[in-house]
Image: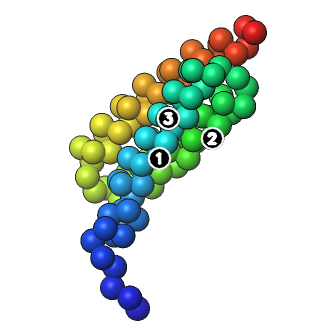
Amino acid sequence: MAKHSDTSWKQDHPSTLFGNSVQKADRAVKQAMSHPEEIAVEHAFNSIAHAENAFSNAVQHEEHMDMIEANKQHLDKVKQQLREVEEIVEEK
């Protein structure tokens, strides 16, 4: 079996995956905010769902809980922003 380098280990680490997925969700929501269309909102919802799965996985591993908590707060903020965009889209 090949030995993992530090970088690949970090990339595969549950808390890192969660952090990365929160960043992707954040970008998807910002995209939906600047282009409030159904497809952008749907993409953002999918990104958030992916981040929430990554959150559950990270919590199960109970490592880097401070990082996980900070990312969870960021994710909650992103979800609130998406709800606001969704209301704009529904009013169109």
Residue, disc 3: 27
Determine the secondary structure under disc 1.
Answer: helix
Q: Residue at x 55, y 34 (%)?
A: 28
Q: Nearer the viewer, residue 13 or 7?
A: 7
- At label 1, the amino acid type is Ser
Q: Position of residue 88 (x, y in %)?
A: 65, 11
Q: Residue 20 placed where, x, y %? A: 42, 48
For the C terminus, the image quarter is: top right
User: On the rendered structure, is 9 left or right of 30?
Assistant: left
Instruction: Measure the C-alpha gap from mark 2 to mark 3.
Output: 12 Å
Mark 2–mark 3 CB contact (< 8 Å): no
Q: Residue furthest top?
A: 91
Task: Report the residue marked by disc 2.
Answer: 46
Task: State the SS at label 2.
Answer: helix
Closer to the N terminus: mark 1 or mark 3? 1
Single out the mark in the foreground, 2 or 3: 3
Task: Answer with left or right where residue 92 lies relative to residue 24.
Answer: right
Sequence-first tag of 1 and 2: 1
Q: Which mark is residue 21?
A: 1
Amino acid beneath label 3: Arg
Q: Amino acid at mark 2?
A: Asn
Residue drawn at x 65%, y 13% is 87
Q: Secondary structure at mark 3?
A: helix
